Amino acid sequence: MKILINDANILIDLVKLDFLNQFANLPHELHTTDFILEEINNEQKRAISRLINEDKINLIVTSDIEDFLGINDLLENSSGLSFEDCSAWYYSKKMNGTLVTGDVKLRKIALKNGIEVRGIIFILDEILKYDLITFEVAIEKIERLYQLNTRLPQQELTKRVELWKNKKYVG
């Protein structure tokens, strides 16, 4: 079972795609931080809080001064990241988990520091791999995702659509 520490942009995209329930049913340990939760709007927060209350997503609450200082240290030693970004990075490192983010700066810095990093396309792959959706729905959602977020890697999206049209998984 993988530990996935989720950044705000991933959770926001999942809410917009109406994919939170499928995400919550993945056989992974899903986490986000209290600081990440504060970054999202009230509607998104309500949807995610429901899954937290159902124990499907674990909320990491930073109450330990050591953790707070660890996050702050990452913030002070990285350019262009927010405290919230650093909280996701910090807990990915602390929990030996995978950081799930679409933030390019966060991705590059975390990878450089030995953290496994994945994005929203990985989440869609996983939802499909575990039969939580059909190939047709996956194609519809990934096309919708590109409309919502044109910064996603077009080549990867095209690759997925072609594989999924042929009812094949990535890997």
Image: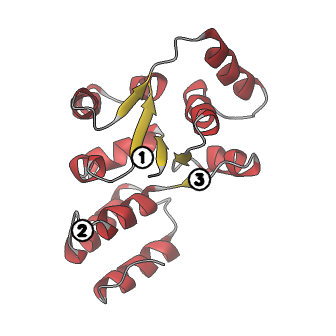
Q: Which residue is drawn at 35% across and 84% down?
A: 168
Q: Which mark is residue 131?
A: 2
Instruction: Give how far apart the Cα atoms at labels 1 and 2 are.
Output: 20 Å
Q: Earlier in the sequence, mark 3 or mark 2?
A: 3
Amino acid, disc 2: Asp
Helix, strand or loop at label 3? It is strand
Q: Which of 135 and 65 is in front in this view?
A: 65
Q: Which quadrant holds residue 39?
A: top left
Residue farthest to the bottom, as pictured = 166
10 Å crowding of disc 3: few (<14), some (14-19), many (20+): many
Q: Earlier in the sequence, mark 1 or mark 2?
A: 1
Label 3 sits on residue:
117
Q: Where is residue 91 in the image (x, y as percent from the top left)?
A: 58, 32
Helix, strand or loop at label 2? It is loop
| Image height of 39 relative to 117, above or below | above
Q: Which of marks 1 and 3 is in front?
A: 3
